[in-house]
Structure formats: C-alpha cells, structure tokens
Amino acid sequence: MVEPTRAPSSGAAAIRWLALFLVPFVVLVVRHWSWAPSTSAGDYAQYLLHAQAIAEGRPYSATGYIYNPAAGLIGPPTLPPGLPLTLAPLVAIGGVHTPLVRLLMIVSVVAFAVLSAWRLARDMEPWQAALGSAIAAYAVEASLASVAPISDPGFAVFVWATILAVDTDGAWTWRRVFGVTALGFAAVLYRVAGIALVPALFLYALLERRRLGIRPFIPATLWSSAGLIGFAAGIVRLPFTERFGNAVLDPAEHLDTFARQYRVALFDAELYPFPSAWNSANDAYHLVASLFVLLGLVILFR
C-alpha cells in the first residue's frame, strides 16, 4: 500500500482555508451578477438552445442553428450533451433566462475549487492547495464564467472528481470501478477533451498493475470501447475534423496559432493586476509570474 503524502485530514483543512481564500471570487461574482454575456459570445446560446430542445421534447439538434463548414469555427453543428442535459431541468422550470443557470455556473466553479484543493492538499500544505485553487476559481470568474452557461466549469468538476476517485488509497472495489467509469463518461459528455482520461488511466493502471490488479483497466476499456463504437456508428462526431487535416498539411501555421492561444491562456490564468493602460507593468508581472509557474510545475511533478 502506498501511503498518502499527508493525512486525509489535510483535505478538510484545505477546504477550511478555501472558504477564506474564495472571498475575492465571491466579490467578483456579485459584481458580475447584473452583467450580460458578451456580444461576441455564442457557445452559451447554443447550449441553452440544446437544453430548451430537450426540455420541450424536441430533437436535440433542433436548435435553428445553421452550420456552414466554411465558417466552422463559429461552432460545430451540435455541442456535447453534458451541459445541456444539466441545464434542461433548469430551463424547464424557469426558461432560458432563469437565474438558476447562473447559480449552476457558480456552484460548478466552487465545486471545482473544492475538489482540486482536496487533491492538491495531499502533496502540499493545505493553505497552499487552497490558495492555488482559489486563484484558479478567481481567474475562471474573471473570464465571466458565471455570466453565461459554458461547459468548462462542469468539465473541470468531473475531471477532478475522476482524479480523486482514481488517485485514492484502497482496493479497487466494483463500486469504485463503477464510480470512476461514470465520472469519466460525464467528463467526456461535457467536453470531448475528456478523452485524455483514457490514456491517462491506462498508463496509471499499467504502472500499478501489481498493486491494484486489472480492475483499473476496466473504466478505460469501457470509455475507449464506447467511443469507438459510437464513432463507427456515426453517433459520436469530433468537432473541427477538417481543421485537423489542415493542421497535418500545414503544421507550422497551426503550431504558431496554438502557441499564441496558450500564451494568452497562461497570462489570463496569472491575471492582470494592473490597469490596461499599464501594459508594461502587466508584461513585467507576467514574466516573473511565469517563472514561478514553471518552478511550481517542476516541484509538483517531482
């Protein structure tokens, strides 16, 4: 048995710290409460239209959205059903403008922070785990997570829940196998990126084969089998497949695009502590903060 790096109570201690460190997040949520979605946003509307179709008993794709491959980046013909299935009961109760939708987004971000802090507390001081998760929650809300329904917070909840269910001491009972399988399916239903859980769990199961037996292989096998069957039957369709082909033919252009996108994403996660007029100050801050992020990654992975 591999002993945890810290006592199980460290997770509870991290949550107590988190209640304090989430105060700035709560302040930002209150400030955003009366805000409307950006005019450039569109995914949230498609999620709501899918949820409305479910609530009204219409076909899932009957949203009125006209898809054109020539403008595929506007959005795929249909979005994954995880978030719409969650939104459908809320829409059925209060319509697409119900404040319950906003409350769902807030609860999802808080749940993500709780789960991540609980797991991180196994490898660092509880207050450090709580502070890191609280900063992440604040950064997510700074991107207006509560203003419109998006799948990212719920996806983060199910990914971290899967991590916690897998990376826990004890035998792999059938109950645990079922729980991990269900959580992984939920993550993929929220975002296709959840398929990364398949190779991750296969590798974990392979490395822990002697200690844990073959049961950790079962969820990953079920995930991959369901995906392959669904893909072959035409039920599962990967979005933006035409761009994958273009990326193979012209990798340099797409690598440059990805580099710029991830750089912006990193800076957004580090936040912008100075006014927009002080670009040089924000640039200097991001340079120093990125060095600390790199140092933290090295320490964490070691």
Image (cartoon, grey):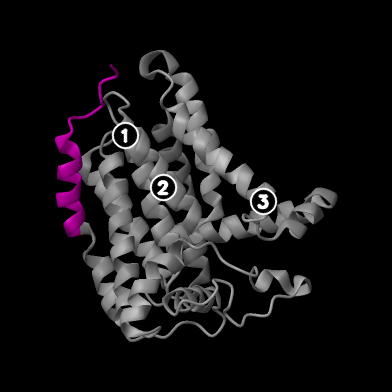
Residue 21: x, y in percent? 22, 58
For the record, the magenta segment spans 1-20
Q: Is residue 107 above or below residue 181?
A: below
Q: Assign the magenta stretch its main secondary structure.
A: helix
Label 3 secondary element: loop
The reply to whether residue 272 is visible in this rendering is no
Going by the numbered disc 3, the residue's amino acid type is Ala
Q: Residue furthest right?
A: 249
Query: How far apart are labels 1 and 2 at the CA level?
Result: 15 Å
Residue 60: x, y in percent? 54, 71
Report the residue marked by disc 3.
233
Picture residue at 51% right of the left edge, 77% below the top: 58
Going by the numbered disc 1, the residue's amino acid type is Arg
Looking at the picture, tell me which residue is in the foreground, 59 or 73. 59
Which image quarter is the C terminus in? top left
Query: How far apart are labels 2 and 3 at the CA level?
Result: 26 Å
Report the residue marked by disc 2.
159
